Image (tube, rainbow, N blue to C red):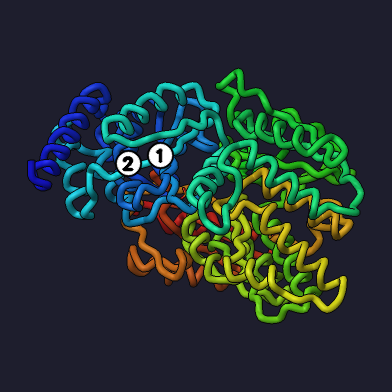
Amino acid sequence: MSDQDLQDQIILQQLSQVEKFSSVHPRPDFDADFTYGTAGFRMRAELLDSVVFRVGLLATLRSRKLDGETIGVMITASHNPPEDNGVKMVDPQGEMLEASWEVYATRFANARSDEDLAREYFNVAETLKIKLDAPAKVAFGRDTRASGPALVSALKDGLTAAGAEFSDFHVLTTPQLHYIVKSINTARSSNPYGEPNEAGYYRKLSSAFNAVMQGKPKPKLITVDAANGVGGPKLAELLEVLGGDVLDVNIINDDVAVTDKLNYQCGADFVKTQQKLPLGADPEPSQLYASLDGDADRIVFYYVDEAKKFYLLDGDKIASLAAMFIQELLGQSGIEDLQVGVVQTAYANGSSTTFIQDVLKVPVTCTSTGVKHLHHAAQLYDIGVYFEANGHGTVLFSPSTIKALETFEASSPGQQSAVEMLLSLADLINQTVGDAISDLLLVVAVLAHKSWGPSEWNLAYTDLPNRLVRVVVNNRFAFKTEDAERRLVEPQGLQAQINDLVKKYKFGRSFVRASGTEDAVRVYAEAATRLEADELALKVSELLKGL
Ligand code: 16G
Ligand code: MG
């Protein structure tokens, strides 16, 4: 048989496998189109069987395209209610799926029949010159949702149909899967990221934390609300590896057995949007509290004062704290040519941006909403701190920064210890994606170094009062923005009306953008006082009536 004949035979066999397996995972009756958005596919779990099966096919093709590097697939719906689920792909270095592939994911999910799907599969392979007999590897995990195991079966069928080799990592946090994917793909390089398994993840974090905390007293008790999600048991495992003398953590909302408690009146999203304590948190003045979201890639902190008044320490506060500490360490190290920068979105509180730029003298970049945008912008700095206000974020150390730190010749013990601290931080902070557990350790460590409690942290700057309003409109796709979502281009004339309103308020700022996850637009407003921020948000929302 000629090479060509052999190739043709492989293609035919694989297409018939795809069709055969697909018939067991039919596309449900679903009027709208599925879309691979900022957080992958996410919806009610019963609609997802065919989608997850098809992601298995696409992950296989992506691995083949990338010379057999391992691709990750995570089954989770993060902070969504328990009846939802979702799926997203992870690229070889632990990053989010390259944006140009999102359209293929969308096309696969929307193919109407098994034959259509096989055709799409063939078309993508053909267009991208992917050899269908090339090796493919996929690693996957899921959160604690009840629908997870059935979706894992659908995924395995997709991977089997397309001929991938796969590893099931069972229940994981999203950042753990990102860590594992990067670790697998760097295992044979000169610079392996870590042992490619959960135990390796705990070991890496705990040894970095111990290094960073050397000589510091044990921090006061921290209460962590785990949203009744996967972060609870995983944080408990990490604490066991750390040993009891290092950190006292009281984990609350860690019931993953009763699956409908997930994210119910608890978790990072609840605390950030409601600005109050989660269920089950006893308010102890001046104690540090934190809430993770359902897949532990997002964290916010908070505390109450003597009068039990609630104070939120959100992603902007975390970014400011991290940037401050890193800037100080760079100063102490004597290294002059490393640039730390902060990446935020338009939702960042104006006070945080002013503080970072004017007080810390650290440059700030603003990007569109969504982790992948911030991540890419942060990669442009030597040390890039990125956080969304909602608590998604991390700190990236570029490879050349690590090299510069490793080879730096310190001329004093002070310089030496600052450089070592920066290197330990790079190990402590998840380099692939925002990680609630790793960010928790980072914040605890920085506070220990500064001998700060939560109120001192909060006092670094005062948030401007702000208001976020969700407005249902006829067509959210009519809202087009520019300048990192800070200005509307369409509907025409609307931005000028917003500008006229904003001008009337001291420290006024407002913008409107279409949500990427819900059928609505969001109005953000901030101003000098609570009343003014509320009024500005209301007036801008009124401009949207009838649109
Ligand atoms: C997604 C994004 C999150 C963003 C949110 C905005 C990831 C992993 N998640 O959850 O970063 O803040 O969408 O939602 O990128 P919105 O478009 O509905 O305002
Ligand atoms: Mg999440």
Q: In the rendered image, is residue 507 in sight?
A: no
Q: Are marks 1 and 2 in contact (CB under 8 Å)?
A: yes
Determine whether 193 is above or below 240 in the image: below
The numbered disc on residue 282 is none
State whether residue 495 appears in this view: yes
Image quarter in which the C terminus is found: bottom left
Q: Residue at x 38, y 44 (%)?
A: 519
Q: Amino acid at mark 2?
A: Thr
Residue 30 locus on image (x, y percent) = 26, 31
From mark 1 to mark 2, how far is it between C-alphas?
A: 7 Å
Residue visible at 55% across and 53% down?
Answer: 432
Relative to 266, is 212 on the left or the right? right
Res. 99 image quadrant: bottom left
- Residue 24 falls in which quadrant of the image? top left
Which type of secondary structure does the marked residue at label 1 adopt?
strand
* Above/below status of 469 relative to 119: below
**In the shown orientation, is residue 17 left or right of residue 81?**
left
Give left or right: position of 108 versus 436: left
Residue that protrudes farthest toward the bottom in the picture: 336
For label 1, being within 8 Å of ligand 1 is answered no
Q: Nearer the viewer, residue 545 or 64?
A: 64
Residue 507: image quadrant is: bottom right
Q: Please name whichever residue, 98 or 122, is drawn nearer the observer in this view of the structure.
A: 122
Query: Quick one: label 1, few (<14), some, or many (20+) residues within 10 Å?
Result: many
Expressed as whole percent of the image width and height from the top left, the position of residue 436 reads: 64, 45
Instruction: Give percent across and percent down for residue 116.
Output: 15, 37
Residue behind mark 1 = 138
Quadrant where the image shows the N terminus: top left
Position of residue 65 measured from the top left corner of the image (x, y, whole percent): 30, 51
> Mark 2 sits on what residue?
60
Q: Disc 1 residue type?
A: Val
